[in-house]
Amino acid sequence: MSSSLGPQRSGEPLRPVTPFFSEGEASDALSTASASPVRQRSAGSPGSPAGVHSPTSLTSDSARRRGSIVNVRAEFIKARKEDEPERTHSSKEKYRKIGIDVMTNSYITNLMAAVVLLDAYCTCADIDARAAGEEPGLELAILSDTCLALYTLELVVLTCLQGCSVFKDWLVLLDLTIVLCGYLELLLNFLAPGDLVGNLGILRALRLVRIVRLMRLLRRIRALRELHKLVTMMATCLKALLWSFVFCFGIMTVWAMLMVEIVHPIIRDMTFEQCDDCSTAVASVMRANLLLFKTVIAGDSWGDIAVPVIESNPYTAFIFMGSLLTLVFGVLNLIVAVVVDTFAEAREQDVLNLAQEMDQSVEDDRKNLQRLFNRIDADGSGRLTLDELIEGARKDPELQSRLRVMDIDEVDLQQLFEMIDVHREGAVEAQEFIAPLSRWVHDSKTAPRFIKYNMVRTMQNQEELFDLSRDYFDFLAMRVDSLSECLQKLAGGHPAAASEHQTGDSDHGTATGEGCIEAPNASVPLGCLTEYQQLRLLCQGSLSRNCLKH
């Protein structure tokens, strides 16, 4: 007959409740509605009526699901190995797992590093003995062969445990090459003459390449972190160093050609008492390049050639000084800048090592924060209150410095405590205290984090207010529907009075403009317009009182 006065929903309109209550019955009904849970939508059909929300229920289901906790101690996502299926039925898989654990143990890694260093010493001693024309000692040969056997054993064990996929690592391929060269040398010792073996001694020197394996050890030991950076920088900048040498050689060649054209005729007519090679030092472009390398880059023999030539012919100073300024202050500094920039780019792209270094720094910082927490925890309960935190900030110099770096004053400290106390218990544990401070101390990002925290809290409050308003409007629509039907029944019982009242109200509404209120999707008789407006005002007043109360 008539549609609902409240917000429209899909399906049937809201079910009306008992139209009129006495004052006591109304208060009892409201208290019962506030204590009862929100009725769910009927599961019969899509058009079934929706449940009616009580106006005194402060939170809806969505608000209950959201909660009001803003977590500020979330951890970074870290990689973890997927749970492997149980393989208890296969002893082979069990032994394979044990073997992998043994080979990846730090003790085995340190042992193989010691073997690499021992093999390097044996190789150096063997090279020194051969250079002196002596025969290497038998003990050096035994130690070298033992190291080769250990290399072979490690390679075989890794192949058996991990299969052919182990050869995807370039270090393993390097090990395979070195082991094959070692056995080739042993084979030549038995089959080939001694001179041939001596000429192929470079095969044994290839074992020194295994020192590259020490990079794994450098990465794991924090005390050798700077050495690892130097080795990494050298490895990543080899290409830049190669092109830098080409660039430097090109600039030197330009100056060498000028020296051959201008300086060589002068030197040819000069006499050098203490330098036999000075007269032919710039006889060709390559000799002039060698002279520039000795005098400008290495700083050797500058006074033997440059000073006498400049004294006899001062105009040649622009060649020597120009080459010095160009190569030393120009090219060499450019090479340093390019190498540093190349390493910086490689370091930015090496996210794995950066993440490991950041994890190590955070771990060290958390240990310091744990000691700081123990110091300011006066009662030793393992929980820190706001008073203890403020008192600790006044007495502990380290906490004062940390808060100063984070740009936190006393007021911000109270807000910080509220942020980390996510459960509103009035005290925080060690992990709740350590996790945020270990991440926020590196940059002064305290103000943006506070703004983010307050924005999240404000958004949650707005969502809860929206749910509360929706509940009240649903209840208001239900009441207006009920009262509308009741007024229609009353108007239907007195048609004459309703017609007369309708005419008077129509004229009054046209004159005053009060009858221009549009009821959304509702049909209200004009004879009941005044009562409807009064009931509307009463409902709005009741809604305002309930909102202020809650």
Image (tube, grey):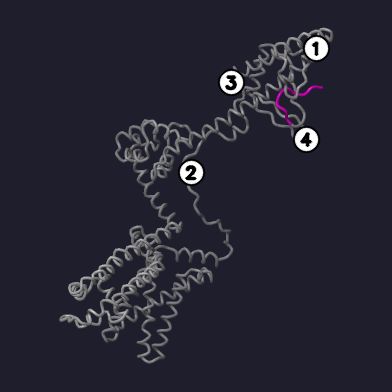
Local packing at callout 4 (Cα closer than 10 Å; few below 14, some 14-19, many 20+) is few
Q: Nearer the viewer, mark 3 or mark 2?
A: 3
**Could you tell whether 299 is left or right of 529 in the image?**
left
Do the numbered discs 3 and 2 sit on residues whose CB atoms are within 8 Å? no
Query: Identity of the amino acid at label 3?
Result: Cys
Residue at the disc numbered 4: 45
- Compute the Cα span from label 1 to label 3: 33 Å
**Mark 1, residue position:** 491
Q: Residues within 10 Å of mark 3 (few under 14, many from 20)?
A: some
- Please give the name of the residue rendered at 34% of the width and 43% of the height, measured from the top-left corner: 371
Task: Identify the element where label 2 is drawn.
Answer: loop
User: How far, Cα to Cα, is label 1 from label 4?
Assistant: 35 Å
Give the magenta range: 1-9
Q: Gap in Å between the C-alphas at discs 3 and 4? A: 34 Å
* Residue 508 location (% of width, % of height): 73, 9
Describe residue 357's horizontal placement relative to residue 13 as left or right: left
How many labels, in total?
4
Secondary structure at badge 4 equals: loop
Furthest-left residue in this view: 273
